[in-house]
Image: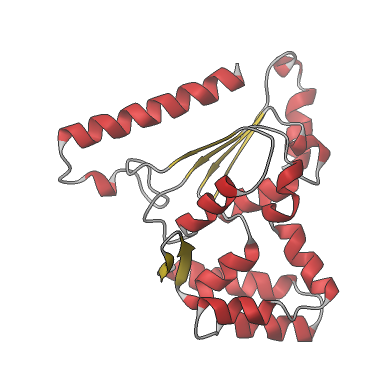
Amino acid sequence: AQQRVQSVRALPETAGLTVGVFAASVGAGVALAAAGSEPAIGRADHLMVLGGYFDIDTYVASVGGHAQRTDRGLVGWEPSDEVKERFPPAVIAAMGDERDRDIVRSAFASSGYESALSRLRDLSPRGRAVFDRLSPRAVWSTVAPPVFWLHDPDDSYEPLAEAYAAQAAPRSGRFALIVPRLVQHAEVGAATKGQDPLFLAGEFARLLGFTLDVLRIAG
């Protein structure tokens, strides 16, 4: 993403234009983390994400513990089969030594959310550095571009709690979150079946307002 932003900015056709970054799912979390450490992404005019995670610790805990933390406490959350198949091996492979890999394996195999978080606290400094490098949480206060975040309320790839955690975290830059049912993580419109026309009109209005905000920033 860093190189792509640099390449786009260098094009004669983009001279004087705004340049933003769009990312989805796990890639959204990685892009947000990079915005705090990679200069080109950090100087983007706006960041727009669909889904995504805010803290890889809590994301691992949600996948391993099948739960997410909300203002009502822990509630059940079932990750998709794709997440359960692909995410754990990717995180385990990112660890630099076998002890940290074993800790991450045990977190994914834990009996609950809090148990998974507890196990991740035993990561070595090197392992912790990897987690922090992958977590927007670790650099959130330094992410300068406006962030526009869409998140499916029934997302089975990243729990909605991750978006709310980002919204609540201290940061001086602009942050806009919309939780629509018209735009789903895996497919568009599945949650609209059988809905009242007034509900659909309201959802369209929210999406339109969100889109206009992005367009105003994008010029």
Tell me: 69 left or right of 26. left
Dividing the picture into quadrants, the one containing residue 99 is bottom right
Q: Residue furthest top?
A: 16
Dividing the picture into quadrants, the one containing residue 102 is bottom right
Q: Residue 85: in sight, yes or no?
A: no
Q: Nearer the viewer, residue 161 or 48?
A: 161
For the N terminus, give its image quadrant. top right
Total numbered labels? 0
Q: Residue at x 63, y 49 (%)?
A: 169
Tell me: residue 55, above or below residue 173.
below
Q: Residue 98: in sight, yes or no?
A: yes
Q: Nearer the viewer, residue 28 or 3?
A: 28
For the C terminus, give its image quadrant. top right
What percent of the width, then of the height, locates residue 69?
49, 65
What percent of the width, then of the height, locates residue 172?
69, 36
Tell me: 40 left or right of 154. right
What percent of the width, then of the height, locates residue 25?
54, 52
Dividing the picture into quadrants, the one containing residue 154 is bottom left
Tell me: residue 153, above or below residue 219.
below
Tell me: 109 left or right of 135. left
Q: Residue at x 77, y 58 (%)?
A: 133
